[in-house]
Image (cartoon, rainbow, N blue to C red):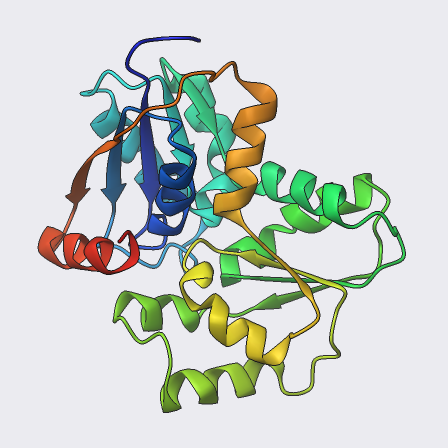
Amino acid sequence: MIKNNLKAGIFDSGVGGLSVVKSLLDEHQFSEIIYYGDTARVPYGTKDKNTIIRYSLEALEFFKNFDIDILITACNTVSAYAIDELRKQAPFEVIGVIEPGVIALQNKLKDKNASILITGTNATIKSGKYKRLLNDKGYNNILELATGLFVPLVEEKIYSGKIMDATMEYYFDKIKKPDALIMGCTHFPLISSEYKKFFKDTVLLHSGDAIVEYLKNNFDFNAKYEKTNIKYFATENPEHLKNIAKEWLK
């Protein structure tokens, strides 16, 4: 898949997928990125499986209007429930973020008895997909924790302060420090500095870095592009999405 112009689509329920965009920009892997955030219906993590699949297939129809080479479903919830349906109907490669995240953990954490904490939306945690894949790799000391309140906070650009501190305290005050923590939602890396306050010596893994490594190892993306053009689309308030992108993709 070597082209002079390599284009990627990034699909997320809201602004969280910008954390994946940032990692891709740092690696200069694509000439163009089409970002689509379903901001009118965020969060997906509170929706049922059929609704998540329906929304995802609607997003797929949007991306068919662009000559993209690969679609990255930056939303963990979509990756948990809709990835198979997307692959069946897409005319281009589709990858999710869960499998790359598990592979990234396996590369960094060799001790199969190490403790692992998975945080994500209610739907992602309920799917059990991270846990099943980790079990298949031989990891069994796993705690899953739904931390869905972080999603609307990030959407509202609340990255720190009293509300964030209280939410962190609410979720993590009684959690024993794990050896590794998977931030199983692309919104969460935007508050990674707050995560680090609670888990100072824990290995933190997030989808953006995992996707970059996965692309390097599984696709023949040899070209490096000096500049990546990004087009932003949102189902509601696209200016809000663009403003957050300006802050986070400096």
Give the side of residue 99 with respect to residue 82, left or right. right
* Vertical relation: 215 (above or below) 242: above
Give the side of residue 133 with respect to residue 156, left or right. right
Give the side of residue 2 with respect to residue 108, left or right. left
Front residue (pair 162, 246): 246
Corner quadrant of residue 68: top left
Image location (x, y in percent) of residue 225: 32, 24
* Vertical relation: 169 (above or below) 76: below
Image location (x, y in percent) of residue 132: 73, 45
Work out which quarter of the rendered image holds the N terminus and state it. Answer: top left
Q: Which residue of the protein is positioned furthest toward the front in this rendering?
A: 226
Front residue (pair 41, 153): 153
- Residue pictured at 54% horizontal, 72% vertical: 195
- Residue pictured at 56% horizontal, 41% vertical: 210
- Residue pictured at 42% horizontal, 46% vertical: 75
Corner quadrant of residue 101: top right
* Vertical relation: 231 (above or below) 149: above
Image location (x, y in percent) of residue 26: 40, 41
Corner quadrant of residue 27: top left
Give the side of residue 208 with respect to residue 173, left or right. left
Number of callouts: 0
- Residue pictured at 40% horizontal, 27% vertical: 29
* Vertical relation: 40 (above or below) 82: below
Image location (x, y in percent) of residue 140: 84, 54
